[in-house]
Image (spheres, rainbow, N blue to C red):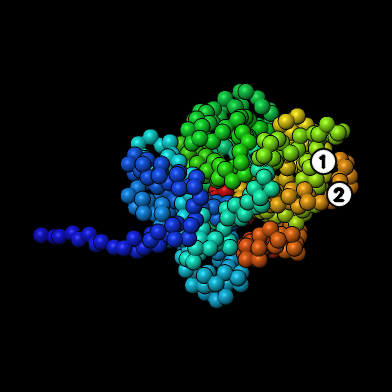
C-alpha cells in the first residue's frame, strides 16, 4: 500500500514571504487594513488568486496560488524572483545578476527573491464563469521591509504623496487605442525563440478594411467580441466611458472616466492584461503595440487626460479664474509649462519602444512632433479642454503599451515642477522638437538629471540598461537585414505584437 504524506511547514517556507511581514514593517494604512478584512471574508468564494505586479515594461507578472494559501500571502507577502527587472522586452538579460548588477541594488546579485505584498484594495474577482479566480496587485519590497528601488508602483506612490502634502489630488483619464485582430491557424511562434530572440508574431487577419472613422457598421463588425469585452470591463469595476471604432482595420479606442492617479495606473494594467487574455480565449488577438507591421494599419496612441483637485475645497486647480483670459488658470498654465519643459527628457517613459517613434512623425499629422500646447487642437502635444469646472489637459505623446506607473508618475512630477515655477508659456510659443527616434529619446533620458530626480539612481540606471539592450539588439538586426528606414520592421513586429 502506498502512503501519502503531507508535510507541515512554517509560513515562511515554499516562497510565502515572511511571517507577519506587513505588520512587522507597518506596510498598510487604515484603508488597506479594512480592505484586507473584506478580502479574507470573500476568499471562501474563490478558488485561485493571481498575485500580480507590473514590471518595468508595464507587463503584468504573476504567480497563481490557491485561496487557502493566499490567506497567508495576504499578510506575509509572496517571494518573487527579480527576473522581470533583469530582462529587456525580448527577454534578453540586460542587468547582470552574476557579477555586480551595476544599478545600486545589492539584492539583485545572485537573483535573490524580493517580497511582493498584495494591496488588498485592488482585489478583484475575474468574471470568468466557473473559474473562480481573483486578481490582486502587489507592491515590491526588499527583505528589510523597504520599498524595492526598482518598483514603479512605489514610484507613483511617492509622487502622489508629494501632491497630498499640498492638499492636492491628481486626477487621470485614460484614452487608449489598440488593435483587435482574428487569430488564424499557424505555429505558436516558438521557432527560433530564446533569450533575446522573439519567434514569429501571432498570425492574424484584419477584422474589417478600416478607414471609415466611427462607422457604426465597422464597429458592428467587431461587436461580437467588443461588446462582451465592454461587459467584462464593467464587471471588473472599471469606469468604462466609451468603446468605439478608430481609423485602422479593427482599431478600437477605449476611454474611462477620470480616476485618482494610482487607481488609473492599476486600471490600465488590469485593462490591457484582461483584454488580451479574453480575446485570446475567444480566438482573437489584442495588441497594444503602436504600429503593427501589417499592411494598412494606422498608429495607436495613449492620450493621458490630467487635472488636479484641491482637496480642501474640492476645486479643480485648472479651471479658469475670474481674472484669467486664457483657457487655463494660472496654476493650470504652470502645470502645462512643466509638461513641456520635461517632454524631451521624459519621452522615453511615455514612448518606450523602438516601434513607438514611427507615430511621432510628420506623416501622421495628429501625432505630436514638438512640445507645444493649444486649446482644442489635436495636432499639439498638449490639448487643452476649457470646460469650466471640468477643465483639463490631454497629453497626446504616449504609446498604449507604456508602463502606466512610469507614464503617470513622470507626468505628475513634471506638472508639479511647473507649479513650483513662476514662468509662463503662452500658447503658440516656440516649441522644442520631440525625439524622432528611440536612440534620440534614450540619449535625452540618459543625460537627464530630471529623470534621476524622479526615478532615483537605481531605477534610472536599470531602465537605461533595459533600453540599451533593446536598442542594441535592434541595431544588430538592422545591420544584417538592412530594412527600409521608415517602415515597421519584422524585428519590431516579432518583438512587440504578441507580448504587448
Which residue sits furthest top? 217
Query: Image quadrant of residue 451?
Result: bottom right
Question: Residue 148 placed where, x, y %?
Answer: 55, 62
Residue at (34% x, 60% y) in the render:
11
Query: In screen coordinates, is 49 left or right of 389?
Result: left
Identify the element where label 1 is drawn.
Answer: helix
Query: In screen coordinates, is 500 left or right of 298?
Result: left
Identify the element where label 2 is drawn.
Answer: loop
Ranked by sequence position, the earlier of labels 1 and 2 is 1
Query: Image quadrant of residue 393?
Result: top right
Q: Is residue 192 above or below residue 285?
A: below
Report whether residue 290 is seen: no
Image quarter in which the N terminus is found: bottom left
Q: Is residue 63 above or below residue 167?
A: below
Residue at (75% x, 38% y) in the render:
318
What residue is pinned by disc 2?
A: 423
Task: Find residue 449 and name its label.
Answer: none
Of residue 422 and residue 266, the one placed in the foreground of this image is 422
Of residue 101 and residue 418, the one placed in the foreground of this image is 418
Query: Separation of disc 1 and disc 2 at Cα?
Result: 10 Å
Question: Residue 492 placed where, x, y %?
Answer: 63, 53
Residue at (72% x, 45% y) in the render:
397
Of residue 310 and residue 485, the one placed in the foreground of this image is 310
Query: In screen coordinates, is 325 left or right of 435?
Result: right
Question: Residue 494 placed where, x, y %?
Answer: 58, 52
Q: Are marks 1 and 2 in contact (CB under 8 Å)?
A: no
Which residue sits furthest left? 1
Report whether residue 110 is seen: yes
Residue at (18% x, 59% y) in the render:
4
Question: Residue 456 placed where, x, y %?
Answer: 66, 63
What residue is pinned by disc 1?
A: 330
10 Å crowding of disc 1: few (<14), some (14-19), many (20+): many
Amino acid at each position: 500500500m502506498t502512503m501519502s504524506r503531507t508535510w507541515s511547514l512554517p509560513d515562511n517556507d515554499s516562497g510565502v514571504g515572511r511571517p507577519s511581514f506587513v505588520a512587522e514593517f507597518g506596510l498598510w494604512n487604515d484603508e488597506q487594513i479594512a480592505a484586507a478584512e473584506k478580502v479574507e471574508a470573500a476568499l471562501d468564494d474563490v478558488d485561485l488568486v493571481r498575485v500580480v505586479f507590473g514590471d518595468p515594461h508595464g507587463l503584468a507578472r504573476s504567480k497563481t496560488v490557491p485561496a487557502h494559501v493566499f490567506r497567508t500571502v495576504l499578510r506575509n507577502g509572496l517571494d518573487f524572483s527579480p527576473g522581470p527587472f533583469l530582462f529587456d522586452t525580448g527577454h534578453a538579460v540586460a542587468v547582470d545578476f552574476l557579477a555586480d548588477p551595476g544599478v545600486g541594488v545589492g539584492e539583485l546579485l545572485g537573483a535573490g527573491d524580493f517580497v511582493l505584498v498584495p494591496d488588498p484594495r485592488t482585489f478583484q474577482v475575474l468574471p470568468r464563469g466557473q473559474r473562480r479566480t481573483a486578481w490582486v496587485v502587489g507592491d515590491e519590497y526588499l527583505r528589510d521591509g523597504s520599498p524595492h528601488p526598482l518598483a514603479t508602483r512605489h514610484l507613483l506612490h511617492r509622487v502622489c504623496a508629494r501632491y497630498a502634502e499640498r492638499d492636492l489630488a491628481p486626477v487621470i483619464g485614460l484614452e487608449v487605442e489598440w488593435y483587435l485582430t482574428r487569430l488564424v491557424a499557424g505555429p505558436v511562434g516558438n521557432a527560433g525563440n530564446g533569450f533575446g530572440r522573439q519567434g514569429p508574431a501571432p498570425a492574424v487577419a484584419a477584422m474589417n478594411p478600416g478607414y471609415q472613422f466611427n462607422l457604426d457598421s465597422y464597429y458592428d463588425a467587431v461587436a461580437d467580441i467588443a461588446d462582451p469585452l465592454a461587459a467584462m470591463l464593467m464587471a471588473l469595476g472599471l469606469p468604462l466611458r466609451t468603446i468605439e471604432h478608430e481609423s485602422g482595420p479593427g482599431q478600437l479606442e477605449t476611454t474611462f472616466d477620470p480616476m485618482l492617479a494610482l487607481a488609473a495606473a492599476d486600471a490600465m494594467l488590469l485593462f490591457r492584461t484582461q483584454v488580451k487574455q479574453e480575446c485570446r480565449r475567444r480566438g482573437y488577438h489584442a495588441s497594444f503595440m503602436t504600429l503593427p507591421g501589417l499592411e494598412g494599419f494606422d498608429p495607436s496612441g495613449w492620450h493621458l487626460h490630467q487635472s488636479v483637485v484641491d482637496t480642501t475645497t474640492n476645486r479643480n486647480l485648472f479651471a479658469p479664474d475670474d481674472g484669467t483670459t486664457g483657457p487655463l488658470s494660472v496654476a493650470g498654465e504652470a502645470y502645462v509649462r512643466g509638461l513641456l519643459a520635461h517632454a524631451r527628457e521624459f519621452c522615453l517613459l511615455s514612448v518606450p519602444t523602438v516601434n513607438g517613434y514611427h507615430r511621432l512623425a510628420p506623416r501622421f499629422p495628429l501625432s505630436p512632433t514638438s512640445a507645444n500646447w493649444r486649446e482644442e487642437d489635436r495636432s499639439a502635444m498638449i490639448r487643452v479642454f476649457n470646460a469650466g469646472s471640468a477643465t483639463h489637459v490631454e497629453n497626446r505623446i504616449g504609446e498604449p503599451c507604456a508602463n502606466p506607473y512610469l507614464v503617470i508618475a513622470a507626468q505628475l512630477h513634471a506638472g508639479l515642477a511647473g507649479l513650483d515655477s513662476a514662468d509662463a508659456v503662452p500658447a503658440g510659443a516656440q516649441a522644442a522638437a520631440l525625439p524622432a527616434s528611440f536612440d534620440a529619446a534614450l540619449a535625452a533620458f540618459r543625460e537627464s538629471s530630471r529623470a534621476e530626480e524622479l526615478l532615483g539612481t537605481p531605477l534610472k540606471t536599470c531602465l537605461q540598461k533595459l533600453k540599451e539592450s533593446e536598442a542594441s539588439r535592434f541595431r544588430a538586426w538592422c545591420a544584417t537585414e538592412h530594412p527600409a528606414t521608415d517602415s515597421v520592421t519584422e524585428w519590431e513586429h516579432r518583438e512587440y505584437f504578441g507580448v504587448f
